[in-house]
Structure formats: structure tokens, C-alpha cells
Image (spheres, rainbow, N blue to C red):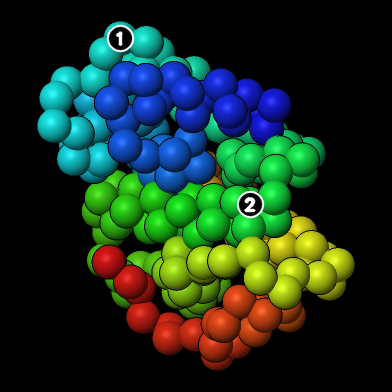
Amino acid sequence: MQADYKMMSLLLTGNHVQHSPAEVHGMLTGQLCSGVANVDPEDLGGLMEQPQQMVPVVCKLIERLCGETTEQLAHVDYHFHPLLPSDESSLMDRVNALGAWCDGFMVGFAAGYIGPDSALTSEAREILSDFGQFAAISEDGSELSEQDEVDYMELVEYVRMATITLFQQLGAAKPPVSASRSTVVSRFGFDERPDDGFIH
């Protein structure tokens, strides 16, 4: 999926979608993890507040992403990865895309989840709180180091496994897998003791 990021970005902007591939993928993944069985492209367009109906090529892209993402999330070998720019992109672009992905995830999850917050496990609430904080990620590219690259990769891995955990708890009847919280979130200005409340 990473290899297609630039192409997807051009397709979306060329069809008047003012959201990055990362944010769109985050939204549909949030929907799937909330218990929505199949993401409707028009419903997703409503979440994106599109000023006009999405063209067929964008709907087809969303349908394909939904199918691929569902398959990856359900795969026994944990093939899922958030859709982000390739490693050849600048760290600044990748960090900002991760923030957009988490922001989209929160929008999609909040729109799709119909149960009470009290029904969520403490682990799920912790993950959602983390994602809410990660949505505020921003990076201006100044004073970046090799350690920042390591921190970013660890943060992506946490997001990846945390997403699978939510899907297994709420989107599919599979044994849960524990997602170890990242110890590097402080580099991006996050509190390592998140609010336990579910952020809508």
C-alpha cells in the first residue's frame, strides 16, 4: 500500500477530495474497528464533509481500501499497516501523515461505534486516548535526528498493533492481542499517562 501513496494523493486531490490518503485510510479503519462491517463510500464522504458527491473513481478507491484493510486486519499474521508515505519521504511528512491518520481514525470510530463507552475495555479506552493525542502530532522538520526516526517507527508499530487490538475486540470475534504502549511518545509532546475517557 505504501507504494501507492503518491498516486492515491494525486487521485484524491484531482477529484476535489481535501483529505490525504492517510486521513481517508484512518477514517475507514476507524469505522471497521468500531464494528462497521462494510464502509460505504458515500457515508465516508459525509464524514469528510465533501461539498459534492464523490466521483466513481474515488468510491472505487475507498471500496478497494476497505476490502484490503479488512483482510489485513483479520489476517492471522497481522498484515495490517496504516497507510502512510513511503520511507523515502521526509520524516516531517511521515510524522504529520501519522497524525492525520490518527485524527481520521478517531472521526471514523466515533461515527461508527454505537455501544456505550462503558462497554469498551480499559485497554480500548487507553488506545483511543492515545490516538486522540497522536492526532495532534506535528513536525516542522527542524533539528531532526536518527533517534527521531527510531521513535517514529516505534510509534507507527504501536499504532499498527493497537489498531489490530481494537479490531479484534470490536470488529471481529478473535482472541485479543496486547499492544505494548510506546515509550517514545514524549518526543512528540505526549503525556504518557493518558486520560482514560473515550474521546469523541
Above or below residue 107? Residue 9 is above
In the image, farthest residue toward the top: 56
Report the residue marked by disc 2.
94
Q: Image quarter for residue 120? A: bottom left
Q: Amino acid at mark 2?
A: Arg
Q: Which of pointers 1 and 2 lies earlier in the amino acid sequence?
A: 1
Q: Is residue 161 left or right of residue 45?
A: right
Above or below residue 46? Residue 42 is above
- The percent coordinates of residue 93 (x first, y second) are 60, 51
Q: Which residue is more in the foreground, 172 or 164?
A: 164
Q: Amino acid at mark 1?
A: Pro
Q: Residue placed at 41% from the left, 57% from the top?
A: 103
Q: Residue placed at 47% from the left, 23% from the top?
A: 10
- The percent coordinates of residue 104 (x first, y second) are 39, 50
Q: Residue placed at 17% from the left, 21% from the top?
A: 53
Quarter of the picture holding the C terminus:
bottom left
Report the residue marked by disc 1.
56
- The percent coordinates of residue 161 (x first, y second) are 67, 56
Whole-angstrom CA distance, mark 1 to mark 2, is 28 Å
Q: Is residue 19 left or right of residue 54?
A: right
Q: Which residue is more in the foreground, 33 or 7?
A: 7
- 1 and 2 marks in contact (CB < 8 Å): no
Q: Which residue is more in the foreground, 109 or 183?
A: 183
